[in-house]
Image: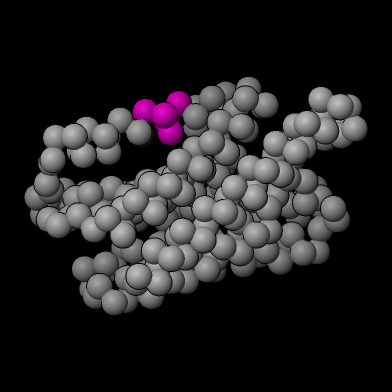
């Protein structure tokens, strides 16, 4: 599907973000960079993005007939976001970074158990998944706000990757269209992606206006 294709296009975009971080880490070791390797990247925003992808992956798992095109692209994007969280934690070593990394690590257990046991969801479990997506939507909104404020206050792009945010913007648009195709049962998916579109636009705008 087009939605899955855009999720797959998010993979090289997030890899671009990681390459920026790794390049800046090398520059720090060479003492040619005086900023953090993860400068201007909001832990809040990356963590909430991981939660969004994770909840979408769980949504696919709890369907009566799991759709691999719905699940596995999200799994790949989630793993890459997990690595970004790891990079932030390894550099900053703050309590917030440690907590985010711990939550992300523990969350990996749930889909592994569901996949290995072949668990299929009841209607109640699907309702729980919808609730999780709604909670994640609120997390994503405040995470995007955090990233926008960080860019606006610092006035520096730092390690923030524009291609990643553009790819995620396209992913949210196609994800919203995918939700409309499913119908009213996917109201939580539509809500999440529509909200992400609104909240991510200021981040892209602030990036363009910020200094390198």
Image location of residue 150, percent across then percent down: 71, 48
Q: How is the image coloured?
A: one colour
- Is residue 109 at all visible to an observer of this figure? yes
Total labels: the figure holds 0
Task: Reply yes or no: does residue 35 show up in magenta.
Answer: no
Image location of residue 175, percent across then percent down: 40, 67
Image location of residue 143, percent across then percent down: 55, 49
Q: Quadrant of residue 64?
A: bottom left
Image location of residue 95, percent across then percent down: 57, 24
- In this view, the residue in front, 16 or 43, is 16
Q: Please report the residue visible at 77 percent of the width from the left and 64 percent of the height from the top.
A: 208
Q: Please report the residue visible at 54 percent of the width from the left and 25 percent of the height from the top.
A: 98
Where's the N terminus, which quadrant?
Answer: bottom left
> Viewed as shown, does residue 12 lie left or right of 103?
right
- Seen as rendered, the residue at the extreme right is 32
Q: Which residues are magenta?
A: 102-107
Q: Quadrant of residue 2?
A: bottom left
Task: Reply yes or no: does residue 105 show up in magenta.
Answer: yes
Q: Please report the residue visible at 60 percent of the width from the left and 28 percent of the height from the top.
A: 89
- Seen as rendered, the residue at the extreme left is 122
Residue 103's place in the image compared with 166, above or below, is above
> Viewed as shown, does residue 192 lie left or right of 61?
right
Residue 174's place in the image compared with 146, above or below, is below
- Is residue 203 at all visible to an observer of this figure? no
> Viewed as shown, does residue 137 lie left or right of 62?
right
Magenta-highlighted stretch: main secondary structure? helix
């Amino acid at each position: 599907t087009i939605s899955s294709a855009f999720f797959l296009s998010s993979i090289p975009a997030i890899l671009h973000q990681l390459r920026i971080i790794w390049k800046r880490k090398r520059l720090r070791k060479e003492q040619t960079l005086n900023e953090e390797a993860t400068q201007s990247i909001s832990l809040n925003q990356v963590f909430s993005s991981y939660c969004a992808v994770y909840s979408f992956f769980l949504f696919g798992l709890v369907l009566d007939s799991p759709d691999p095109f719905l699940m596995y692209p999200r799994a790949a994007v989630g793993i890459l976001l997990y690595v970004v969280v790891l990079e932030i934690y390894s550099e900053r070593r703050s309590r917030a970074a440690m907590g985010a990394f711990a939550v992300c690590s523990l969350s990996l257990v749930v889909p592994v158990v569901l996949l290995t046991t072949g668990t299929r969801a009841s209607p109640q479990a699907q309702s729980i998944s919808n609730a999780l997506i709604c909670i994640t939507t609120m997390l994503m909104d405040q995470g995007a706000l955090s990233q926008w404020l960080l860019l606006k206050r610092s006035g520096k792009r730092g390690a923030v990757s524009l291609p990643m945010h553009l790819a995620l913007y396209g992913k949210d648009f196609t994800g919203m269209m995918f939700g409309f195709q499913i119908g009213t049962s996917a109201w939580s998916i539509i809500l999440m992606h529509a909200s992400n579109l609104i909240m991510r636009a200021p981040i892209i705008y602030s990036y363009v206006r910020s200094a390198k």
